[in-house]
Amino acid sequence: MSCVRRFNPADLPRVVVICGHYGVGKTNLTLNLARDAKAGGRDVVVVDSDVVNPYFRSSDYAQLLEDEGVSVVAPIFAGSTLDSPSISGQVNTVLAWAAREQSPDVKPLVLIDAGGDDVGVTSLARFATQLRVCDASVVHVFNHSRNLTTTPDEVYDVLTEIEAKLGIATSALINNTHLREETDAETICRGIGFASEVQARADLDLWCSCIPRALHEDMRIKAALEQAQQAEYLVDRLVSFVWE
């Protein structure tokens, strides 16, 4: 019988900033976290703060989220390919909502999908004071299969660059190793081992390793997770590419 722990997004702290290198899968992860947290009883708002990459933004999937009761705060020029350094003034309101005391039946969760690298968090940095008031958790996402994050030192370098720009220390890590549609059990197992190395290098908690739902019964993956003592988080591929 498997003893692998399951990561539960319903247990996330009130404000979580999802950051990391370009192309590691932050947006797809954010969409999964939002849907699962909402299903678990949280009042979820997704803030799309990515004003750098016009092609992979959470706000492009606003209808998917809103159909499931998740609210979306988007950049002013979301829905276009304009790269304008603008972010909605609603962010202050959302963070104030998350910070204040609520009635027992209100369980706020703000998920902030940050742009890639230190450049991607530039627009978010102006909210650093409010994020500290909310005791926001900054989570660094990495993908062993992504160029320039293939060694623990490379991941750590990106992490420290983001910290310096954002002005807030990283709280935890999430392993999101994948090869898009070519992801297989070997890819996932390799990522699990790599995640342990990154965790040791960064000296931070590893919240979970993301596992494609179609592969989660693979016994090789179960064994790798158990050996590494990592929690699994089952994800669906929700982000599609322009050519799809």
Image (cartoon, rainbow, N blue to C red):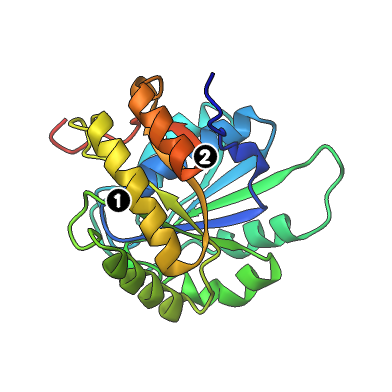
Report x, y in % for residue 158: 32, 70
Residue at which label 1 appears? 143
Name the residue nearer the viewer: 3 or 166. Answer: 3
Q: Quadrant of residue 128?
A: bottom right
Q: Is residue 1 above or below residue 49?
A: above
Disc 1 residue crowd, few under 14, some 14–19, many 20+, Cα 10 Å: many
Report x, y in % for residue 24: 30, 51
Residue 122 in view, yes or no: no
Outermost residue, right side: 103
Residue at which label 2 appears? 231
Q: Tag 2: residue type? A: Ala
- Quadrant containing the C terminus is top left
Name the residue nearer the viewer: 182 or 130. Answer: 182
Question: With 185 as the anchor, is 135 left or right in this view?
Answer: right
Sequence-first disc among 2 and 1: 1
Q: In which quarter of the image is residue 180?
A: top left
Q: In which quarter of the image is residue 219?
A: top left
